[in-house]
Amino acid sequence: MSKDAFAHPDRITASRWITVLVRQFPELRAELAATPRRSGAGRRRDGADRHGPSAPLRLRVSDTLRDITDGVVELEEAVHDRLGLPPAARGTVEVRLVRLAGLLERVEADPVLMRHLLDEVSAMARRCAGALGDAEPVVRLRGRCPLCASVSLRAFPLRRAVLCINPGCRCPHPACGCHADRAHRHSWPEGEWAELSAGGGIALEEITAALDGRSAAPAVNR
Ligand SMILES: [Zn+2]
Ligand SMILES: [Zn+2]
């Protein structure tokens, strides 16, 4: 199989993460607007801070908003630079993300750039979810990983993928993201679930139910 055949799942994963970010970023902005503004009135006469826990939360949300805004601008610049495109036009975070999604086919031809983009968008989406107070939902799957035989398969509905969470698990394809570094896990995007189901002894319906949030199995911690 050619190298490109293995890059394809990365494009699907990148597209999922971008979709998650486009959906979550406005929620983050709304969260900031809903948090009481810290002002002089927030201090009691004895000097204690009346807002207590809301101030750190607000700081965390505003830090995240700023970092993601900067991160998306930098990522789009890096992609344009590497692809030899003219500098990106101005735009909101959401506009820039949609434009990036439109470039994924070209990014895919450059595995190093695709890896960078994946690292960035997945980290930003997780950070966004973290600041919103919801960890990414995870559903444990029955059956064993067809690569390492561990009971380590988890479905991640947000990114519509199944991952093997065993840190030592590697597939036989050196170009796959699971070989990139220790932080990456092998994942099976939608197009590979039938194969995974056959190899792991899991019903295909269990995988699709878990990813659609219809699973009876409880969400677990990674
Ligand atoms: Zn595995
Ligand atoms: Zn792999």
Image (cartoon, helix red, strand yellow):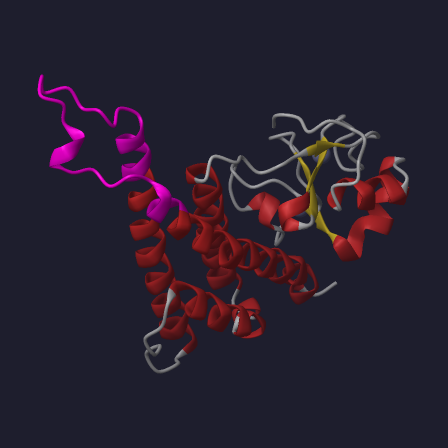
Residue range highlighted in magenta: 31-59
Residue 105: give x, y in percent of width and height: 58, 73
Residue 221: give x, y in percent of width and height: 61, 25
Question: In the image, what residue occupies the spot 30% across and 38% down?
Answer: 58
Is residue 64 depicted above or below 134 in this figure? below
- Would you say 197 lies left or right of 44 here? right
Residue 188: give x, y in percent of width and height: 72, 48
Question: In the image, what residue occupies the spot 90% across and 35% down?
Answer: 201
Residue most extreme to the top: 46
Question: In the image, what residue occupies the spot 30% across and 25% down?
Answer: 53
* Ligand 1 visible in quadrant: top right
Question: In the image, what residue occupies the spot 76% across and 26% down?
Answer: 151
- Would you say 162 lies left or right of 95 here? right
- Would you say 184 lies left or right of 124 here? right
Q: Quadrant of residue 85?
A: bottom left
Report if residue 96 lies within the magenta region: no
